[in-house]
Amino acid sequence: MKKARWPALHPKSASLLFLLDYDGTLTDFTNDPEKSNISPAVRNLLRRLRNRFPAILISGRYIKGLERVSRLHGFPMVGTHGFEAKRLPGGLRFASRTLERRFRKEATRLWRAIQVLQRQYPGIHIERKPFSSTLHYRGIQLAPSQVRQLHRDFRKIFKATVTHRLWTLQDGKRMIEAMPKGFSKGKAVLKILKKFPDRFPIYAGDDMTDITVFKAMGNRGLRVAVGHRIPTQWCDLRLESPKEFVHWLGQFDVKKNR
C-alpha cells in the first residue's frame, strides 16, 4: 500500500465527496460484463455513504447498464466515460441531446458492423451501448499476435463505419472501446468539483481512463488506485483489489463507526 499524501480525515468527517469507478474498483471483473454485480453488502454500504456524503458513480458503462448491474437505482451516475449524466447536482449534463442522438445512431451502426468479429474470434463479447461500443476478450485465450490482429480488425471496421473525427479508441483490460471524442471522466469530474467547492473529493479507479481524473484533480483530494494498472505517479493511495478497497471504504460507514 502506498502512503497517502492527504490530510488526516476522521471517518465521521462531513466534508467528503466520493467519486467512484465501478468495474475493477467496486467489483472484480468477470468474463461476462453483465455479471459484474456488487454484493448486497456493498450496495448497502454505498447507500449509507450517500445518505451522509455526496457520492457519484463514474463509469465507462452506459448509465442504464450500470444501473442494471449495480442495482443502485436512484444513485447519481456519470456514464460512457463522461458523456452521460444522471441525477447530478443542478441537472448537470455533458452532452447535448442533439449530440446524443447522433452518437446513438453511429454507435448502433458500429455495433452491427463489428458482429463479423464474432466469427473470427469465437468467445469475444461485444457490449452494446447507446453511445459507444466495447469489445471484450477476457473470456478467451489469445496469443499476443492474435490480440494485435484483433485490434487491427476492430480499427479497420471502426474507420469504415463511423465519423472518424467524432470518435476515439481506448484500450483497457483485455478490451478495446470506441467512444465519443472530447469527453472523459476527467473533464466530467472537473465540472462536478465546481458544484462542490468546499468538499474534499475522494476518487477511486483502476484503469487507464481513470488517469484523466487523477490528472484533473492534481493535488486536490485523494486519488485511490485499485490494482496495479495505474502508474504510481498518478495516485496517492494504492489498494490491491476491489475487496480491499471496499474494506477501506468501510471506515467512512457511520453504522460501522458508531
Image (tube, rainbow, N blue to C red):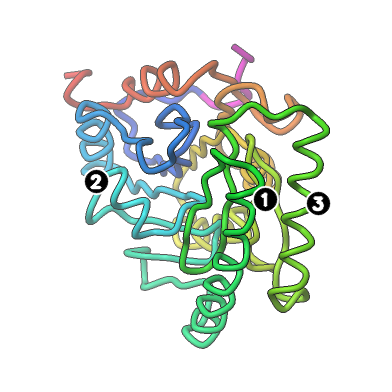
> Badge 1: few (under 14), some or many (20 or more) residues near its Cα, within 10 Å?
some
In the rendered image, the quadrant that contains the N terminus is top right
Quarter holding residue 42:
top left
Q: Which residue is mark 3?
A: 152
Measuring 68% from the left and 40% from the top, which residue is drawn there? 208
Instruction: Name the residue: 59% across, 20% down.
Output: 238
Residue 222 occupies quadrant: top right
Q: Which mark is residue 71?
A: 2
Q: Which residues are magenta?
A: 1-7
Q: Is residue 152 above or below residue 208?
A: below
Percent coordinates x, y for residue 50 in the rendering? 27, 43
Q: Residue visible at 72% across and 55% down?
A: 154
Mark 2 belongs to which amino acid? Answer: Arg
Question: Can you identify the residue that label 1 sits on?
Answer: 216
Q: CA distance from mark 1 to mark 2?
A: 29 Å
For label 3, the SS is helix
Q: Relative to the observer, which residue lies in front, 119 or 194?
A: 119
Q: Amino acid at mark 1?
A: Ala
